[in-house]
Amino acid sequence: MALTAPTGQVFVPGDAAAVSVGADEVAAAFEAAGSHVVRNGSRGMLWLEPLVEVETGAGRVGYPQVTPDDVAAVLAGGATGIGVVDEHPWLTSQRRVSFARVGVVDPASVADYEAHGGWAGLRRALSLSPAAVVQEVIDSGLRGRGGAGFPAGIKWQTVLDAASDLKFVACNFDEGDSGTFADRMVVEGDPFTLIEGMTITAHAVGASEGYVYVRSEYPHAVAALRRAIDAAYTHGFLGQDVLGSGLTFDLHVRVGAGAYICGEESSMLESLEGRRGEVRAKPPIPAIKGLWGRPTAVNNVLTLCAVPMILSNTADGGPGWQRYAELGTGRSRGTQVFQLAGNVKQGGIVELPFGVSLRELVEGYGGGTLSGRPVRAAQVGGPLGAYVPAAGFDVPMDYEALAESGAMLGHGGIVVFDETVDMARMARFAMEFCSIESCGKCTPCRVGSTRGVETIDRIIAGQDVAANLVLLDDLCETMTKGSLCAMGGLTPMPVQSAIKHFPEDFEPQETESSGAPV
Amino acid sequence: MTTASTTDRVALVRAISAQHLADRGPLMPVLHEVMEELGHIARQDIETIADVLNLSVAEVHGVVSFYHDFRTVAPPTHSVALCRAEACQSVGAEALYDDTRARADSLGAGVEVTEVFCLGNCALGPSGTLDGRLHGRLSAERLDALTEGWR
């Protein structure tokens, strides 16, 4: 038998992205052919999906863009593959920490999770005092990965120090930014990591109940999470007296209902409490008065998924928090999970220590545009992030360097645009999106966004362009200064970056169109 | 609608609401379940839920009207939800959305085409759902092929 002939399991990702291009049909075809199929997570090389992996004597060999018609050839070892997946340069050049197990393990298997280092962090954390656990998270330098970048350990310290009859852990899994899918993929591919992270958090801050607020647009993730939580309860990792430690922690899944604003933490808390997702004024901060008036540790999925590793010892017995702190640069410690999206040839997950340049991500990993036309811009940090022109791609990707250049890291999403993009239309969309998703509390956001659409429409139509640009700038200042949260407060960021870097798109247009509409 | 089925509906919604009474913040889970069982949330349902959960009708109506997912009219025969967010726009989603909305009837009778903002499938756009099922790399041709059974 050839060396690359299959010897065991066939992995067909169950990740939503893979399913969106036919993975379910491929899995069924392999099962019909008698294979034992495992629905793993995605390796995050999304342009290759459905990426089927076959166990062979040489390791797990990958076959890209498989269709049901390819099954026979793959099983006979005759199809063209990409070699052993673990040796692929896309993966070997990364530093996968949060994504270490995604695509590797069976997300439904507690045993597989444990065999790959799972539960070690929780076991060790339960042997430490809550204060000691908090200190290790502080020392790791872990910053919130939702977008705000607040030091997670400091937040936990506040919750731990707050006296209360009841405390909560809330996971913000309302990953609504266009260009982001890391939270979705890690929960679909390695859900126990999130559960372990939240349980460690509960021990650290003194919480007994946890809530994961997940978008309704993520049904595969909801299913994977519910299944994993059931398994965790069965094996004693959740519920009463976790692992015999005395900790009681109950974890609930709560599904959103299509509101982008519920990704803002206080809006999420309102929604969890059964109300309209209106943003709350701070103080009080959620760490002191969060869910139902109690101290609540609110963290993003990726932040919580870094916790088990931070609390585990390394292979040579050293502290995990130190290994984490040693990655990265300056005040941006640890790794960042970048997501390459949009008009990009090779989209997916790139996890690296902070400091890599945007150019290396877009052109190196991403391979440039999908269309083959020149890259014109990238929007970094989601719909409230700045548009960076191709000439500005040498900026290092960390919190401080990006902020200095007028951009924002956010949740690490990077949306690539080719030269057909019309930046005036993108600026208009930023205002339109704000008007649709505004919670309505603040007039500058609720009304300003609508006025912003109207003003940009006049500019696009060539009416009093100079005067309307002045008005738009003034409106942006009002929204920035007069909004309670980032929805209204940062909508001006993409708008003003578009005007600053692509002024030609806002000049009166010729009657012949100069490019395909976006 | 017959009186009997109205009574059944009220009873069902009462039962769903009562089942979640012990949960913290029961309203969102109740509304999701009503959506799943009945396809939309009628005015009567709002009154029933408010009664069981001891909320005002205004509060329940306020929540139903806030969230895009909660519909107050009966669902269509078939639904197409296309993403209009930035990553999908970068690969032509805007034109696809305009085109599909304009020719919704050509996909099938009573097909509803709506916009959605991000399905988390941003590297394989244009993305959308057909009767709730996620598809990537959509185009007019792919939409026609995937909806063949609707005509």
Image (tube, helix red, strand yellow):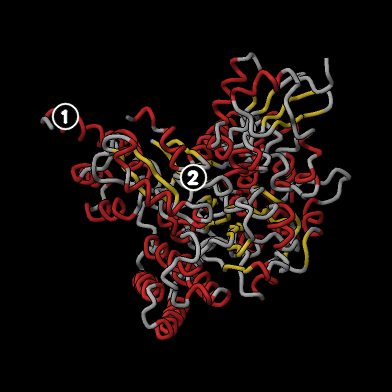
Residue at point 61%, 70% (across, down): A407
Residue at point 68%, 57% (across, down): A362
Q: Tell which of B115 and A329 is nearer to you.
A: B115
User: Is A312 above or below relative to B85?
Assistant: above
User: Residue placed farthest to the front in the image?
Assistant: A512
Q: Secondary structure at mark 2?
A: loop
Instruction: Report, in whole angstroms, how far the alpha carbon at label 2 lies from the one at label 1.
Output: 38 Å
| Mark toward the viewer: 2 or 1 | 2
User: Is A311 above or below relative to A505?
Assistant: above
Counting residues from the N terminus, which is met first, the one under dot 2 or under dot 1? 1
Q: Which mark is residue A282?
A: none
Identify the subunit bearing mark 1. B
Q: Position of residue A163 (x, y in %)?
A: 55, 60
Q: Position of residue A135 (x, y in %)?
A: 72, 59
Count the numbered circles shown: 2
Tell me, yes or no, if residue B71 can be seen here.
yes
Q: Tell which of A223 and A370 is nearer to you.
A: A370
**Pointers 2 and 1 in contact (CB under 8 A)?**
no
Q: Secondary structure at mark 1?
A: helix
User: Is B2 above or below relative to B105?
Assistant: above
Q: Is residue A417 left or right of residue A60?
A: left
Q: Position of residue B127 (x, y in %)?
A: 49, 45
What residue does disc 2 label? B127
Quarter in which the N terminus of chain A is drawn = top right
Q: Is residue A116 left or right of residue A151?
A: right
In the picture, residue A117 is in which quadrant? top right
What residue does disc 1 label? B5
Identify the subunit bearing mark 2. B
Q: Position of residue A449 (x, y in %)?
A: 38, 70
Q: Is residue A425 left or right of residue A127?
A: left
